Amino acid sequence: MDREYDVPLAEVQIIWDARDNPELPAVEVVRKGHEDDPRYDCSWGACNQDFSDATPDEQLNMLMKQFVHMVVVDKADPEQAHKALMLIPEYRKALADFGSIDPESV
């Protein structure tokens, strides 16, 4: 199911703040080319050459690893990070395939 604010994985840029700023969402998903937001100190995704050069399956694998990094290393709130990543259709489909979310929500 396409949603109005979906961001395709190939175009995704994830921004987050490892400094735990209570005035910002912990993690945001924006489209590649989105103007840099200086309030966030970290970004990853289509702005990285290795991600852009990867196959769709490799990009999805990289996304899952980046989720772990944001949560474990940078201490981003896991619920907020997951909620932000739900804007990525490929992320939702992967979770549905894994059985973690209702396939109807994809």
Image (tube, rainbow, N blue to C red):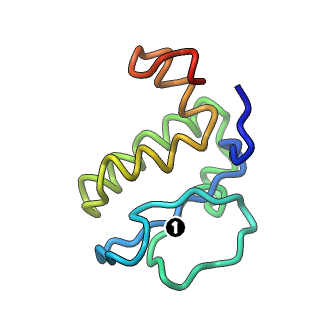
> Residue 33, how many percent across, how many down?
75, 67
Element at label 1? strand
Query: What amino acid is found at the position of numbered circle 1 in the picture?
Result: Ser
Residue 17 placement, left or right of 89 = left
Badge 1 density bin: few <14, some 14–19, many ≥20, Cα 10 Å: some
Residue occupying image coordinates x 40% and y 51%: 81
Residue 52 placement, left or right of 25 = right
- Determine the image quadrant of residue 104: top right
> Residue 87, how many percent across, how many down?
59, 44
Quadrant where the image shows the C terminus = top right
> Residue 63, how many percent across, how many down?
50, 43
Foreground pick, 37 / 61: 37
Q: Name above or below for residue 104 compared with residue 74.
A: above
Q: Name above or below for residue 26 compared with residue 56.
A: below
Residue occupying image coordinates x 44% and y 22%: 101
Q: Name above or below for residue 106 compared with residue 45.
A: above
- Determine the image quadrant of residue 3: top right
Residue 19 placement, left or right of 38 = left
Q: Which residue is mark 1?
A: 43
In the current view of this chain or complex, which residue is farthest to the bottom? Answer: 38
> Residue 15, how many percent across, how many down?
51, 65
Q: Give the total of numbered labels.
A: 1
- Determine the image quadrant of residue 55: top right
